[in-house]
Every structure is written in structure tokens, then in C-alpha cells.
Amino acid sequence: MSGHSKWANIKHRKGAQDKRRGKIFTRIIKEITVAVKDSGADPDTNPKLRMAIQNGKGENMPKDNIERAIKKASGADAANYQEMSFEGYAPSGIGVFVECSTDNTNRTVAAIRMIFSKYGGNLGTNGSLDFAFTRKGVFTIDKENLTDWDLEELEMELIDAGLDEIEVEDDIAYIYSNFTDFGTMHKKLDELNIEIKTAAPQRIPNSTETIEVSKAKSVLHLIEKFEENEDVSHVYHNLELTDELIASLED
């Protein structure tokens, strides 16, 4: 799983933080909007909204921004977002899965096609990467919130809730669950009074591909172009983030 968390760390270190934060806030506002439209504006009775609010807090989104997003989503003129996904290949045959949330599907399809084509990739058909990724629940927790826990004891507590793996890198603990157990794991962590930083279903590569650094940089350039697009929510890939590649990005 290390490639997954390494990618998060790379984005944190090398990205323009204000720009990245704005993109994250936009994504969370969309999550709030979809949740409110689906099941109402009360987080006590809307688990999806509760999770979106929690993710906003985990990303240090101001409380006023969250409240405004809920209020706007409750109005008659709130945007209607549709979730879409695209599968394809980056240069060197690296698999890329792009998830979007959009209020204009024609715009989004055109933009995704353009990015694949312009930066050396190829757009595939839906289902073409089913073999390459597995959906899992991913929970991030500040390591300081686990100081009362021995990791082996925590694993025993969580195994019946669908635990797949616990991984600790730097100051963050990543808890992975089976996709079908996402809600059960979320509830279990709440019961244990473990504060969750962010929680979401994500696509984890079943295996990763190692390519030379110069080619890997072309792949990451394509991925970054997707992530810059306002309609894109998440981008997943199966590129192995080697220590050599990470070092080259920090130069």
C-alpha cells in the first residue's frame, strides 16, 4: 500500500499549497452538495454529509465555508453534480483511473479526452482497468490520536469491522478496510473514540509498475494535469513511486 500514501506525501511536499487547498475545498463543497441533495442538510441523519463535513475539517476547511456550502446546497438553485469515471493509460502503459463530479458532462468528457491525448495517454473503455485496482475504504488518522493504542491491539479491535491493513507513515496512520465494510469501519472507529482526519472509498492498485525516472515524470505530469481540472475529484494510478523518483521530484 505504500505507493498510495507516498503519492499523498509527494503532492503535499511539491505542490503549490494554496492552489492545492483551493482544489480540495472545491471537491469537499461538491461532496457536501451531493450529500445534501441526496439525504438532506442534517448531518445527524445524513451519514454522507457527516463524512463530507468531517473531511472538510480534516483538511482545515473553515467552519464558515462548510456552513455556507450546506446552506447553498439546500437552496433551489444549487448545482446538480453527476459522478463520472474514466479509465485509460498514461505514457509507458501506466493505468490511470479518474473520478469526476460535474455539472456539465460534455465539458468534462472533452477535458478528460484532451488531457489523455495531449500528454501522451490513451482513454480506455469503462471496465478496462477493473483488474488493476481494488476499491477499499481509506481512513487517515493523525498518529497523535493513536497514542493510547498498541497497533496490534487496535488491529484486533478492527478486524471484525473489515480491517485490511494499518500503515503508519510520518505523522499519519492509514487504516484500510474492505470496500463493503466502509460504513462498519467508520462506525467502529467512532465507537472507539478515534478521531478520523479523512475517510473515503478509494481505488488501490493491485500491483505497481516501475519505470525509469524520466518516463515516470511524464506520467506524474499527466496525473497533475488531471488534478488541476476542477471537475476531477480523484486520480488513481499504478506507478511505483520509487525512492529515486521521489528524490528527483525534491530537487
Image (spheres, grey):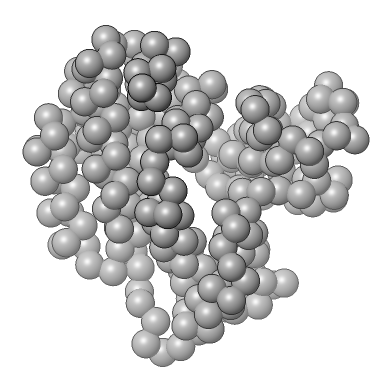
How far across and how far down the image is residue 33, in percent?
A: 47, 72
Whether residue 18 is visible, yes or no, is yes
In the image, residue 25 above or below residue 200: below
In the image, residue 212 above or below residue 109: above
In the image, residue 158 above or below residue 225: above
In the image, residue 118 above or below residue 229: above
Tell me which corner region of the image, top left, top right, bottom left or bottom right, holds residue 203: top left
Identify which residue is drawn at 47% across, 83% down.
72
Identify which residue is drawn at 30% across, 63% down.
102
Whether residue 86 is visible, yes or no, is no
Rendered-image quadrant of the C terminus = top left
Q: Is residue 76 left or right of residue 136?
A: left
Identify which residue is drawn at 69% across, 41% down.
141
How far across and how far down the image is residue 22, in percent?
A: 41, 59
Q: Is residue 151 left or right of residue 75?
A: right
Tell me which corner region of the image, top left, top right, bottom left or bottom right, holds residue 169: top right
Rendered-image quadrant of the N terminus = top right
* Residue situated furthest right in the rendering: 148
Q: Is residue 243 left or right of residue 215?
A: right
Depth check: give the residue in front, 179 or 80: 80
Identify which residue is drawn at 53% across, 29% down.
5
How far across and how far down the image is residue 63, in percent?
A: 62, 71
How far across and how far down the image is residue 35, in percent?
A: 52, 68
Number of residue marks:
0
